[in-house]
Image (cartoon, grey):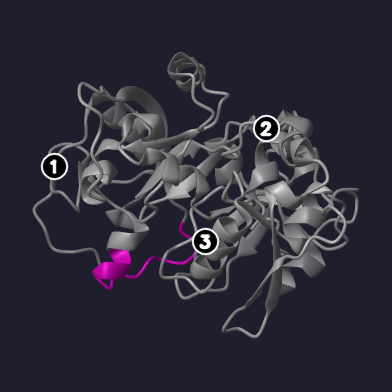
Amino acid sequence: MLRRVSSSALVQRAVVPTAATVATLRNIVVFSQQHHILESNQKARNSPSNVWIEDWEVDRLGMKPEAGALPTQLVLDKQLELFNFDQLLSPPEVMEAPKHSSYSSRKVYGERLQFELNDRASKHNFQSKWWITKGQAYKENLQFKANMRPSVILTKSQLKLFHSSQLNGGDALMTFPISGGSRRLYSKKGEGYAALADHIKSNNFNSGLYFTRRQMEFFKLAPQPNMVPVVQDVASGERYLIYNVDQLEDPHLALKTLQRAPVNVPTFLLSGEPIMSETTKKFPKTFRSNYWLTGRDAELYQWPIKENEKRRGVPFNAGNSTSLQYELFNVEQLTNPEEAFAKAGLFVQ
């Protein structure tokens, strides 16, 4: 399950005007000052912290809110990627559902999803009312038919959040190691967490935000003279040099400059990763940009494709066992490429 949330840099002197997708199993959820409700509530508390944490995470981590502290409630977009049973090679043998239903929970979807899924079923001539996520299909060892694409649905999710200043000892959350690329908390079980935590403590940094060399090149950042980075060797054999945001010449630049650096090979817009596929040899050479995204991502993030370009996507197979095929579009095929660049800028890994 994914939650669509916004993210922030955790430092008083800088604010990130963007949104990001944060996966589960992350203890800390950080939101952007762009969200007016959170911004107003933070100002009311006269706190420099931009860190917010979900109520159930507070309980799970054994933290205690201050007496009388009330959580802030937000309603956010949530992404659902669903496959119809008609897209499976051998769907499970279950009694057909009267309405569109979740195979995972065996429950009927609400009215809004009924409307959305009716539209998808009609468009693709699906007969089954059962829907399943890719994760659930893997868990059940179910196989998809060739070239199947999920139906991407945007629905709403309600979150209850406590600001770090509402928690006893919550100020410590400001200096938890955070990736400058994804704005996600480094896993405590990961290879770099302990080294980064020690680096923050020994240098008395105000922030836990870190950038790798690659991320710094992406955001056109530079370290101050004579700054010593954290050196992280990972199991793959790669070595990363990681700088805290307090070690940078201009921390504001990390949060204001979201322009993508030019790339010379076809690259995924959202991740910044090169597209490692033989398919790239067939990509049109008519575009100046080497940034591409899938049609479903364009739909999900509400970046409209030009009307005359909608039928000019490039078929792309991810090359895994699911045999799922996507359609890629160049950013120049979007009606507003600059908006996509700005919003995608923080998805650098």
Labels 2 and 3: the sequence-earlier one: 2
Q: Residues within 10 Å of mark 1 (few under 14, many from 20)?
A: few
Name the residue that disc number 3 marks: 197
Residue 233, labelled with which disc?
A: none
Residue type pointed to by label 2: Ala
Q: Nearer the viewer, mark 1 or mark 3?
A: 3
Q: Which residues are magenta?
A: 137-148
- Of the pair 232 and 334, the residue shown nearer to us: 232
Q: Nearer the viewer, mark 2 or mark 1?
A: 2
**Could you tell me residue 54's position as x and y percent?**
32, 38
**Is residue 258 positioned above or below 218 on the image?**
above
Dot 1 corresponds to which residue? Answer: 107
Q: Is 94 inside the magenta-drawn segment?
A: no
Q: Is residue 54 visible?
A: yes
Q: Are marks 1 and 3 in contact (CB under 8 Å)?
A: no
In the rendered view, does 252 fall on the left or right side of 202? Answer: right
Residue at 63% over, 51% down = 180
The residue to which callout 2 is attached is 14
Determine which quarter of the picture holds residue 333.
top right
Residue 281 percent across, percent down from the top left: 81, 69
Residue 140 is a magenta residue: yes
